[in-house]
Image: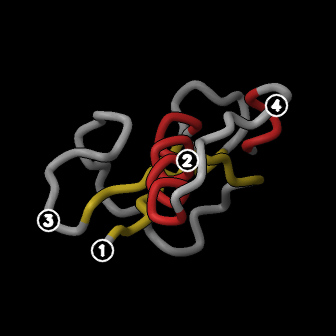
Amino acid sequence: MYELLAEHDPAADIPVLLWHVKAKDAAATLCGRVSPPPSPGGSGAARDRYCPPCMAAVGQAVAATRGEPWVEPTGTAHDWQ
């Protein structure tokens, strides 16, 4: 089982939530980041973003369960946002 965890993106100029994917019992997210603390509700974030390495890991896992080859998304990192 996996879960999504959000953190405030410190690199953003405006309030942004950055979402990571983590296995339920793991200490780190799929991209290797130590699990961020849960973000409080009503964070006031102007928008959400998704961690590209975490989303790629999910895409690879889904493709593997279907017996399909993994195809990296085209475009820029902004396509993940």
Q: CA distance from mark 2 to mark 4?
A: 13 Å
Instruction: Look at discs 2 and 4 and give the one toward the viewer.
Output: 4
Q: Earlier in the sequence, mark 4 or mark 1?
A: 1
Q: CA distance from mark 1 to mark 3?
A: 9 Å
Instruction: Look at discs 1 and 3 and give the one toward the viewer.
Output: 1
Instruction: Please report contact status of discs 2 and 4: CB closer than 8 Å, yes or no.
Output: no
Screen quadrant of the N terminus = bottom left
Q: Quadrant of residue 28?
A: top left
The residue indicated by pointer 2 is 55
The residue indicated by pointer 1 is 1
Relative height, residue 41 to residue 66 (above, below): below
Amino acid carrying mark 2 in the image: Met
The residue indicated by pointer 3 is 25
Amino acid carrying mark 1 in the image: Met
Q: CA distance from mark 4 to mark 1?
A: 27 Å
Look at 57% across and 63% down and name the residue there.
Answer: 43
